[in-house]
């Protein structure tokens, strides 16, 4: 992709043919796909709050009350985000999605097969019994507790210092893919960067779309569903 992120007509035609000829496409998405929906990347600050500082297990354990203050602040905006045409195009095509995002927009767009490697910001999980609750409970309780066991609830997202979710399943999906769509991410961080290497070893076609996915994906995914 060029610096101004303009894709040539020839490149689009090649990608269209790759999509049309694929029997097992898989999409791996990152924060870039949701930027047109008004959400920041993890490298950004959010109203003066460094997101990289927020997304740490250490902060949750040591400064739980402050962590939840940040969480409510971020949640107020993220709950208003809606899918864009990139999310809808993947859903309409029926392409399974492995996402590093925590915004829930793929499921909101209608995708039926989604692996959220880093969890979902709109859920709370009990640190004791693993029960799941709506994020709205954080507005009713200063430090949300589980109704069943009274354990402390935590946003159901993978913080720095924790293992990603569903990684074994993600490896299995990519291992069977004949086309890997990499959208809104460079796949540089471990362990997600291993997914690209698995696809390459298996000879899968690779399509990278780092920006303007809301424009490009509808063009190359037009056609019949993969399901």
Image: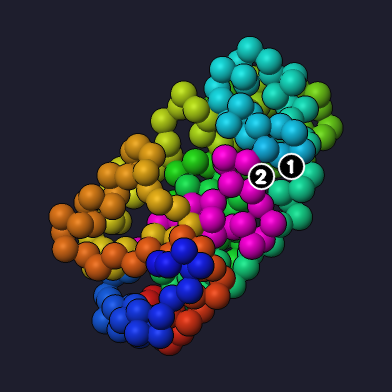
Q: Quadrant of residue 47?
A: top right
In the image, is residue 14 part of the stretch drawn in magenta?
A: no
Q: Residue at x 40, y 67 (%)?
A: 1
Is 119 left or right of 175, judged from the image as shown?
right
Q: Which mark is residue 75?
A: 1
Question: What residue would you read off at disc 2?
Answer: 122
Q: Is residue 174 visible?
A: yes
Give me the C-alpha separation between circle 2 and circle 1. 8 Å
> Could you say which is closer to the camera, residue 110 or residue 16?
16
Q: Quadrant of residue 62?
A: top right
> Could you say which is closer to the camera, residue 209 or residue 150?
209
The image shows residue 56 at horizontal and vertical percentages of 56, 25
**Secondary structure at numbered mark 1:** helix
Residue extending farthest to the right is 140
In the image, is residue 29 part of the stretch drawn in magenta?
A: yes
The image shows residue 195 at horizontal and vertical percentages of 29, 49
Q: Residue at x 40, y 57 (%)?
A: 28
**Secondary structure at numbered mark 2:** strand
Badge 2: how crowded within 10 Å, few (<14), some, or many (20+)? some
The image shows residue 213 at horizontal and vertical percentages of 51, 68
> Could you say which is closer to the camera, residue 121 or residue 201?
201
> Could you say which is closer to the camera, residue 215 or residue 60?
215
Mark nearer the N terminus (2 vs 1):
1
| Quadrant of the image containing the C terminus | bottom left
Q: Are marks 2 and 1 in contact (CB under 8 Å)?
A: yes
Which segment is the magenta one?
26-44
Badge 1: how crowded within 10 Å, few (<14), some, or many (20+)? some
Residue 66 in the image: above or below residue 220:
above
Q: Residue at x 51, y 79 (%)?
A: 218
Q: Is residue 217 visible?
A: no
């Amino acid at each position: 992709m060029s610096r101004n992120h303009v894709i040539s007509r020839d490149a689009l035609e090649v990608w269209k043919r790759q999509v049309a000829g694929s029997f097992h496409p898989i999409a791996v998405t990152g924060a870039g796909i949701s930027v047109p929906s008004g959400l920041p990347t993890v490298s950004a600050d959010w109203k003066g709050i460094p997101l990289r500082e927020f997304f740490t297990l250490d902060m949750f354990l040591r400064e739980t009350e402050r962590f939840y203050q940040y969480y409510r602040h971020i949640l107020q905006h993220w709950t208003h985000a809606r899918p864009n045409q990139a999310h809808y195009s993947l859903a309409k095509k029926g392409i399974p999605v492995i996402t590093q995002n925590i915004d829930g927009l793929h499921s909101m767009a209608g995708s039926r097969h989604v692996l959220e490697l880093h969890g979902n910001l709109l859920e709370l999980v009990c640190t004791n019994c693993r029960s799941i609750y709506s994020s709205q409970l954080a507005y009713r309780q200063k430090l949300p507790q589980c109704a069943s066991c009274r354990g402390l609830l935590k946003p159901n997202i993978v913080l720095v210092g924790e293992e990603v979710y569903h990684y074994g399943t993600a490896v299995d999906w990519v291992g069977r893919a004949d086309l890997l769509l990499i959208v809104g991410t460079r796949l540089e961080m471990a362990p997600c960067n291993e997914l690209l290497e698995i696809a390459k070893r298996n000879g899968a076609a690779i399509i990278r779309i780092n920006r303007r996915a809301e424009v490009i994906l509808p063009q190359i995914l037009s056609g019949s569903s993969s399901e």
